[in-house]
Image (tube, helix red, strand yellow):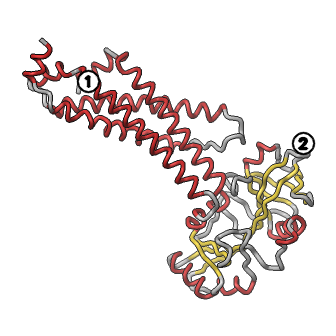
Amino acid sequence: MRLALRELVRRPARFVTATLILTVIAILLMFLGGLLDGLIRSTTGAVRAQDADLIVYSDTSQASFLRSRIDPATRAVVEEVPGVFEVGGIGVVQLGARVPGNGPRDLANVALFGYELTPDGVPDPPAPGTAWADEVLRDDGVEEGQTIALGPARSPITVAGFVEDTSYLGQGGLWAEPATWRAVLARNRPDARLGPGVFQALVVRVEGASPGEVAGAIDAATGSTETLTVDAAISELPGVEEQQSTFNQIIGVTVVVALVVIALFFALLTVERTALYGVLKALGARSRTLFLGLVVQAVILTAIASAVGAGMVLVIDRLIPPGSIPLYVAPSRLVLSAVLLVLAAIVGCAFSLRRVLRVDPASALGSSS
């Protein structure tokens, strides 16, 4: 192992090409992961923020807020189900918002929520006519205390303050008390107007029972609802599973490319070292010791490439204009990408194991003389 480390120190030029290629792969891998996290974050934030165990939709809505309707009678049944601790109504309307100072066609995409139970990170419902705004709307010029006009009816909403990570389907969240949401919905989507006490969905907090059991009990009691856990509701959002599947496949291919690069590089390096390995074996070195040296070199090169790649991705994240690309660089994603690359390095080295094992001291020394 010490011989492998000395070679890295004394002959670094031999490993520059492989390290550069691995660095490019690391940047690509981490950027793709950040892009996936950013897309999922901007799509699911409002649902992930719900401080609840279950979300109740009407059974014909296909788990869509916009198609769902829960009337007061159904809500009363839900509230009586054993294990249900607290119930709150929720609804959303997606509109374009005119922001003071922006052009007449430069609209901010917003999702106005009316809510009763406070989500994580969102204060209690503000005064009528006001709303808490998601931080992403700052990129559209929205400021605290500003009044923006929503939809074709230009319904005025005053920004009471900002919250984080509550976007919905790529649109910045606005969080208002239910009456404000109903008024905006009725003026801008007359066909979707709701009666008194009707919400698009219910969020339910469970106590003293498992959420799965309570979900089944709710649907059995009402006969007209589809109740999902928050995680299941997130999976049902349009595009979430498709985005995850597509990006995970691309990430998987990138890891395989890294594995192939490492395998080819160290296979060639092993061929070049055949005579050296023959000498070392003649002096008593074991095959596993020689192979361990290869693994150590591959892991060190990959670790360097991952560190440089992570730094480059962080720089790219700072250089990208806010609101242009939904890139979210999380430390956990950088670490996961580095771990995947290290595993690929170890597996890639395994292709050289057979060649190391087959090195015969006598024939290797004979061929080198």
Residue 92: x and y, percent? 76, 65
Which residue type carries mark 2?
A: Gly
Q: State the quadrant of the N terminus.
A: top left
Residue 287: x and y, percent? 15, 32
Tell me: 270 left or right of 106: left
Circle 2: is it few (<14), some (14-19), or many (20+) Cα within 10 Å?
A: few
Residue 214 in the image: above or below residue 37: below
- Whichever of callouts 2 and 1 sits on the residue coming sooner in the sequence is 1
Question: Residue at (90%, 66%) from the top-left corner?
Answer: 187
Tell me: 34 left or right of 191: left
Circle 1: is it few (<14), some (14-19), or many (20+) Cα within 10 Å?
A: some
Does dot 2 land on a helix, a strand or a loop? loop
The dot on residue 103 is: 2
Q: Which residue is mark 1?
A: 4
Q: How many callouts does the rendering have?
A: 2
Q: State the quadrant of the C terminus.
A: top left
Tell me: 290 left or right of 178: left
Residue 180 in the image: above or below residue 98: below
| Residue extending farthest top | 369
Question: Residue at (63%, 74%) from the top-left corner?
Answer: 204
Residue 363: x and y, percent? 9, 21
Residue 240: x and y, percent? 59, 57
From mark 2 to mark 1, how far is it between C-alphas? 63 Å
Question: Residue at (41%, 25%) from the top-left corner?
Answer: 19
Tell me: 338 left or right of 294: right
Does dot 1 land on a helix, a strand or a loop? helix
Image quarter of residue 155: bottom right
Which residue type carries mark 1?
A: Ala
Residue 104 in the image: above or below residue 369: below
Residue 35 vs residue 143, the one in the foreground: 35
Question: Residue at (24%, 25%) from the top-left corner?
Answer: 270
Front disc: 2 or 1: 2
